[in-house]
Image (cartoon, rainbow, N blue to C red):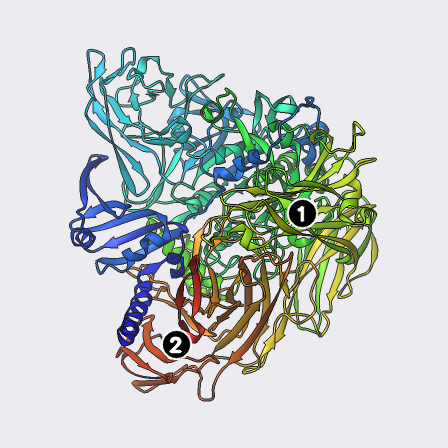
Amino acid sequence: MNGKYLLTVLLITTVLAFAQTVKISGANPAILDTDTPILAKVKVSDVYTFASQWKTTPKIETARVLGKEVKVATVSINGLELRGRLDGASATLYYKGPASALKSIVESPHVESIFVKVMPEIPPRDFFTDVASLLEKGGGTPQPTLPVMREIIGASRVEQLFGVNGTGVVIAIVDTGVDYGHPDLQDALAWLIKTTDGKEIIASAIALVGGSLQYKTLRGQTSTLPLVQVASVEPLALDADESQVILLQSFTASGGYLQTSGQTFYVIDGPMVNIVNAACNYAVTGLVSKSGVYKFGMTYLYIPWYGGVVKVGVVMYDPDQPGVYTAARVDLNSNCNFSDDPELRYFGNRLIVDSPTAPTISLGVAGGYFYDWGLWLDVYAKFYPGWDLSGNYLSIFYDFNSHGTACSSVAAGRGRAVYDLGYLGQQRLRGIAPGAKVLGVKGLWWGMVEAGMMWAAGFDVNQDGQWYWTRQKRAHVISNSWGISEFIYDYAAFGYDFESAVINALAARGFLDRNYPGIVVVHAGGNGGYGFGTITSPGAAAGAITVGAATSGHFWLALGTPFYGFRWGDIISWSLRGPTVAGYVKPDVVNIGAFGIAAYPVGWGRYYYGIPEDWDIFGGTSQATPLTAGVVALVLSAVADKVDPAAVDPFLVRQFIASTAIDIGYTPFTAGHGFVNATAAVIAARAYYGLPAPRSPVALFQTNSVVNLGDSWSFQWRVNIPLYFGYLMNNVLTPQWAAYLQTGVPQPSLGMTSMYLTANPGGQAVGTLTVTAVGSRLAVSASVQTLAPIYRKTTTLNIPVGTLGGYFTMQLLGSDEDVLRQADLVVFRIAYSFSAFDPEFDYVNNVRPVLWVFGWTDLNGDGRIAVNELTWINYGYQRGTAVEVPVSKLSAKLGPGQRLVLRIDIRPVTAPYPASVPVTLEVVAYKRVPAPDASITPSAYTLAPGQRYTFVVRVTPPSNAAPTVYERLIVLNVNGTSYVVPLSYVVRAVVPVNTAYVLTSGRSDSWYSASEVRGGNDWAWRYESGDWRVYYVSTPTLARGLYVDFRWRCINTSLILYTVTDSGFFAGYFWNQGVTYHRYLGSGKFNWTGVGGQAKVLALPAASFAVPIVAPGLLYQTMSASYPVAGARSFAIVARTSLYGGCGTSEAIGGVVRPFIETGDSPITITTSPYVRVVLSRPPISYLFALKSASVLGGGLVVPMATVGGDLRFSMYFIRLPVFVDYVALLYSPENAVWSRISGDKFYRYPWYAVEGVSVIS
């Protein structure tokens, strides 16, 4: 190809790629280069010409919605489907699917704008079923008395001591829905009564008694309300996705049948309308209608365990009063005859089940509330009761996945059903708080979790589309077992991002409304470990109680593996690790996540396993989170005699949970405070409120640490979040938010129980820790500790490829078992070459590793290891080239006479695979020792009951400390019991401009090491899996940008760099700016990348840049076409593995940063001339030419400029004075092109780097 032609194509392609991003709002434009699941709202100027561009024609259908005709357009483009309402020729279309599929759509000239919402995700079913692939069946004896989750966590003890089971408390499970038809969850459904004077009553049960509605309060008291005072009654459930609103049509019966055959019916599904045709006439014999008019529609329920989409008839009728539709039936057995289906009643049963005691079919709940998107029922998005007494529609709340039902089961399952759980014998699955009610919020079908959480917290939308605080929570705690893994999904990094901002606002007292008390939000941290920094969003939110996953091996026995025993309380390999990008500690606590047993939707067992029992394996931080939410419910229920649970300060609840957690021997970045202890948390709460409780060494902890969310917090609440609610939902935020537009957005008030400090190398930082004695006199001794390695052994083994690799005693490995028993923590690691993992480099793994840790009791004395002689301790099984398995307090986990045994498997996955694989095994033992760089004073103090005392913590990093984050343990011995207050501190290096600084050469911790990485990538998980390191630098004077260079040794390893300003924004939104060029393939897989095909990566982060957000229609005057960040001087540089070559159990990395600026380069802050001239600094990389362009952002116009040249000078003429101008020079640097390995020896080269600046014009 002609070189000049190729260069022209490159230029045009690059200009188009960057030009099209201005159409996108709601998410970082880089998301379009990934397969991240998204919801997109696409505004098309002319749907017909748009469709013709793709050589297709739109399908136009007419639906009747509440008496109005609505035209619905469907455009299919290469398998991608966009659907939505038609308005003349223009259309608002919606798309749900991989983001990358939209990339070509963005380029269409007929697309006016695209709003992108990244969808929260839950684990795929494979995450749970994969456990079964590791099973070993064998003979054994049932052990029905073994402790399982309730006993381990302490919930059973709470019930024994206090009779507390969660009664009086509502847990909001924001998820995929809940199957309330399951016998274990039928009683978990509450009711929401709205009165004619605007009040709300949450009832545990209702009954119609004459002309009154009798109800029981959440605590069981009976009360009545005249029906004339009742505005509505609905089950306490919310379909925030509006996924099943059945539009009903009027029919009269003829010969006992409704003439429905061949008729078309409609079901609202969020922004779309599903069209269903009835295949038969439906019998209504015996169904009395006082008006003679029946209301009929068809379902469109997506329920996989019933074969997919369930399309059955629904009828509403008016048996009591003409035109008042208080009865309904659903054709559960699909026989076109309603007379044999259970009757549903407005004031009675709402469960759509074939039998309440032994159901085999459950299609959900008739009614509840739903959140209309402002597309169908009104111009504003609002909440509506799901049962329309006029018979216009019926909403059905159901679980489309099973995940929400399982979460509800472990949190509040009633234990009605009896299950045969293998070697655990006959068991009932009682949740942690079996007396609590569950507010099911479906928000993961379309991703409407934000509206769902706000409704659960007590917010609503008025007739003008504005959110307001109702002054009453509908739930007491929100449990979120979902997250977003794509680190670059938002304009700001995790913890500062859109979703984290919503969580922080919900948790903060008084932010959303001055009278709003805040709510407890318990959030899953993610399953992307073992690498450090694998916390996801919004688990990274400072205001969330973020939960990691610990072990309990009882599930092996339930699944049929006859282990001799099991242990609990270690951190599973895939549980998230901290730190956050800002450096504060996550997770906050851990709970059982590997694994458990939960109730699943009715029909699950028959469909998947051919058994009548509806249970299955459950786990992940998905399970650990509702277990912890259940403990929160116990805490609030335990103090309900003294205080309204809704009035308890969310931070106080955090203190109860965190301060009483069990010290399980781990570090802050792996376990936070430790393992949740329900018994101790409830005792602490009761003692705090002066209620009877056993004397116990209970102390509450609080630090003076604060997470400063910077300007990104203001951006989220002035621009990004209002745009989401305003543009996508046509809502306006609360009146208090409107006041922030005038006064500025205050930082949220979020207390901390962990400590978070910042210092310079050779400097110091001071924080305070306040300890409150609750109920009794406390003798407290305090120290700051760290983990120091005391033993390290590396061995090379040749492991045969197969289901069973081999068992290894420590003697066989040459390791000193006595030393390991004396250690506080032992970490076992294996690694093997990428050439064995994926020899074809086609991103399909050929083998997978599993590393097991057991205690072995030679029961028959034959010297041979058998499964029924093994006590399971922990294991790891990432689909990658390395695995890490930690075990704490090994001496306590090995029984008398037991020997420590490792098992290493290299299992076949895809042929061809070798007969055996050389594996490197490393065993590292750690001991807690006094931290040389941190201290606490005094070292001991005795507190009287009720007394508060403040300790002073000082960190003093050495002058040669690497500029990274450090984890320490503040260990408090309280009356002989050890508790941990996590401490993290950031060391920030001050780097003069035009000076190179080595980020990785200083001293750092052994486990979280600044100078090495250890893999952690998992090709069966998501974006975050890998090993992440953070480095902190600042410049004493303003630089134009940074030059960042990282290198590594093993050629098949690959790194990605991100740079984040101290306000949380990515430092520029062009590739190789705030994030280096990379291609994410989904499921944790990345293409290998390296500059010039070498083990090297470069970035040019900007200090001044524009956040490329678009506000279609400029809904709010505060919004602009973009958002300026002018003059960042502090940065976090993040390096993470995207591939790990497996050349060893660890790999050294080297990183250098050089802030750069040239003489004459300075931002313009004011101008009186119609001319503006700028010179951007040339970065320290070679380039052939620069493509220069300038954009007016925030209003105003300039003469457009786009030139090609080597210099970086800009000269423009104002037509009208702009608010700010963004200057960009795209540098064409083939010498520094990023090579992306597509497959085998095929590479794609990306040669572009950006230098950017912003001039704010006053």
Residue 776 placement, left or right of 500: right
Residue 928 placement, left or right of 239: right
Say whether residue 689 is visible: no
CA gap, disc 2 and disc 1: 50 Å
**Residue 986, image x and y in percent?**
64, 66
Q: Nearer the viewer, residue 168 or 521?
A: 521
| Residue at the spot of label 2 | 1227
**Residue 597, image x and y in percent?**
58, 31
Q: Nearer the viewer, residue 1039 or 701?
A: 1039
Q: Nearer the viewer, residue 1033 or 215?
A: 1033
Please state, as top left, top right, bottom left or bottom right, where the C terminus lies in the image.
Answer: bottom left
| Residue at the spot of label 1 | 658
Q: Quadrant of residue 4?
A: bottom left
Secondary structure beneath dot 1 equals helix
Q: Which mark is residue 264?
A: none
Residue 892, above or below 768: above
- Nearer to us of marks 2 and 1 is 2
Secondary structure beneath dot 2 equals strand
Residue 951, above or below 230: below
Residue 381, above or below 115: above
**Residue 611, image x and y in percent?**
50, 21
